[in-house]
Image (cartoon, rainbow, N blue to C red):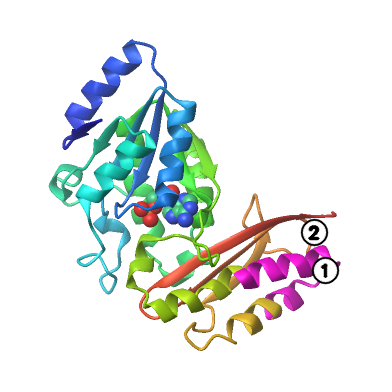
Amino acid sequence: MQQTFTIAETWDLLDRARAEGLRIGLVPTMGFLHQGHASLIRASAAENDLTLTTIFVNPLQFAADEDLSDYPRDLERDFALCEQAGANIVLTPSVDEMYPLPILTEVAVNDLSSAMEGAQRPTHFAGVTTVVAKLFNIGGRCRAYFGEKDYQQLAIVRRMALDLNFPVEVIGCPIIREANGLAMSSRNTYLSPEEFDAAGVLNRSLKSAVALAEAGETDVEVVRRHIIDMIETESAVSSPDYVAIVDAATLQPIERMAGDVRIILAAQVGRPRLLDNIGVTLPA
Ligand code: AMP
């Protein structure tokens, strides 16, 4: 595994690999890696000849009052995890390398970015799509792997790649969870042991909602209320910021529980806001 620090040296390596006919996989991350990230690297390594993992805590996607300065970092551990999972190149650019000048260009995906996380964090997705556009220009023609944990982000990135003709096939990968169902996240490190246990209710509430829908409940409001009531039984978990029940492809709210449905929620648990979601296919 090779470590790179600059975009130019990464382009050189990828140009050479492509000249040899190698297929390239790209796994963008913000580091402090866990088994969720490892699953993306493994998926890329299985489907491509060379996997580029990037580790970059992107200032653009953090609002002023968010945790940019103390976002958790452990590069030594990250490199070991990348190597074990099958990455071939790990790019860790500095902020100056990515943003040598204050950036004047922004990539934003309208509509898809305004609800759910976008309503809670109005500048977040433009920061994500701008840096992912840059990473796609660094990766060039490739397959890029993103987690369904950030389901709205995955849909937005997919649409950006389509709208702007990036030569990138965006691939979504399933959510990797802790034993209590909590979706793995770098920010779980902020949780106390009690909060960690309590946060298991997020996934339990989603699974219970799916069971309710599969048993024939078609009223979206009943399903949403069921989730909120379950979460509110855990005092360490705040009432969710949102519970969105949407069409899995368009992310538009649906009126009845039918077809390909995604249930997406966010809730504060102690310091971090945690995201989770689940999919279900119901009779039309
Ligand atoms: P991050 O480092 O949080 O920006 O995440 C980098 C990538 O890993 C994103 O595509 C995330 O959706 C994905 N990811 C994070 N946590 C998980 C998880 N628990 N399961 C699957 N993918 C994940």
Q: Report how far apart the C-alphas of labels 2 and 1 lie in the structure.
A: 7 Å
Please name the residue shown 65% across and 84% down the image: 229
Q: Amino acid at mark 2?
A: Ala
In terms of secondary structure, what is the magenta stretch mainly?
A: helix
- Residue 16 magenta-highlighted: no
Q: Mark on residue 218?
A: 1
Whether the residues at callouts 2 and 1 have beta carbons within 8 Å, the answer is: yes
Q: Is residue 113 visible?
A: yes
**Residue 187 figure quarter:** bottom left
Q: Amino acid at mark 1?
A: Thr
Q: Residue 152 appears at what percent x and percent y?
A: 52, 56
Q: Is residue 143 visible?
A: no
Residue marked by disc 2: 258
Q: Residue 217 appears at what percent x and percent y?
A: 83, 70
- Residue 214 magenta-highlighted: yes
Q: Identify the residue at the far top of this view.
A: 20
